[in-house]
Image (cartoon, rainbow, N blue to C red):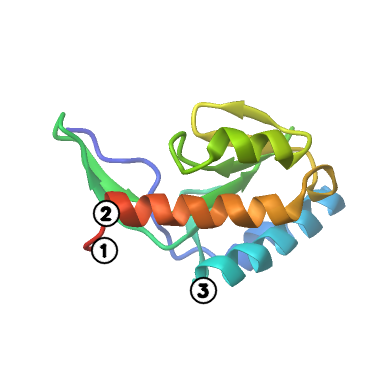
Amino acid sequence: MAKNKTVETEKSVADFIGALTDETKRKDCQALIKIIQQQTKLEPKMWGPSIVGFGSHHYKYESGREGDSPNFAFSPRASSIALYFSGNFNDREKLLSQFGKHKTDKGCVHIKTLADIDQTVLVKMIANQLNYIKQLYPAQ
């Protein structure tokens, strides 16, 4: 079985965020880290070259594939900031309808800037994501 490409690394989150050339995106990512830290009580870690993750859990699918994944993560991309949410957390569609300007694909929710969204809703979505992960992986 192939190894997962996205694993936790020892690289510096501050250096990664500090190297972002788009000032708005850099400031938004710094603010996101503070928001997520308040919710998770966890320090950010780099996962692969470009994902900032908080906490982790070990998963194992029926197919036999297994690995580790952050409980919550985001990644500054060229056209957006990708927020990594499960497609199944509680009240997902209701909260997304109140979230503000965004796009979705699979488990990701893409935003341009924090100014485009309701940060109170973001906090609820993060809390619901964390609760969902705790339900799936209670022993971790």
- The quadrant of the picture occupied by the N terminus is top left
Tell me: 47 left or right of 24: left
Tell me the distance, in whole angstroms, between the alpha carbons under discs 2 and 1.
6 Å
List x then y, in percent, for residue 62.
Answer: 15, 32
Q: Secondary structure at mark 2?
A: loop
Amino acid type, callout 3: Lys
Name the disc covering residue 41, or none: 3
Asked whether residue 47 appears in the rendered view, the answer is: no
For the residues bearing labels 2 and 1, Cβ distance under 8 angstroms: yes
Comparing 19 with 88, the one in front is 88
Amino acid type, callout 2: Tyr
Amino acid type, callout 1: Gln
Asked whether residue 131 appears in the rendered view, the answer is: yes
Residue at position x 85%, y 48% from top? Answer: 115
Q: Is residue 130 above or below residue 111?
A: below
Residue picked out by circle 2: 137
Comparing 33 with 7, the one in front is 33
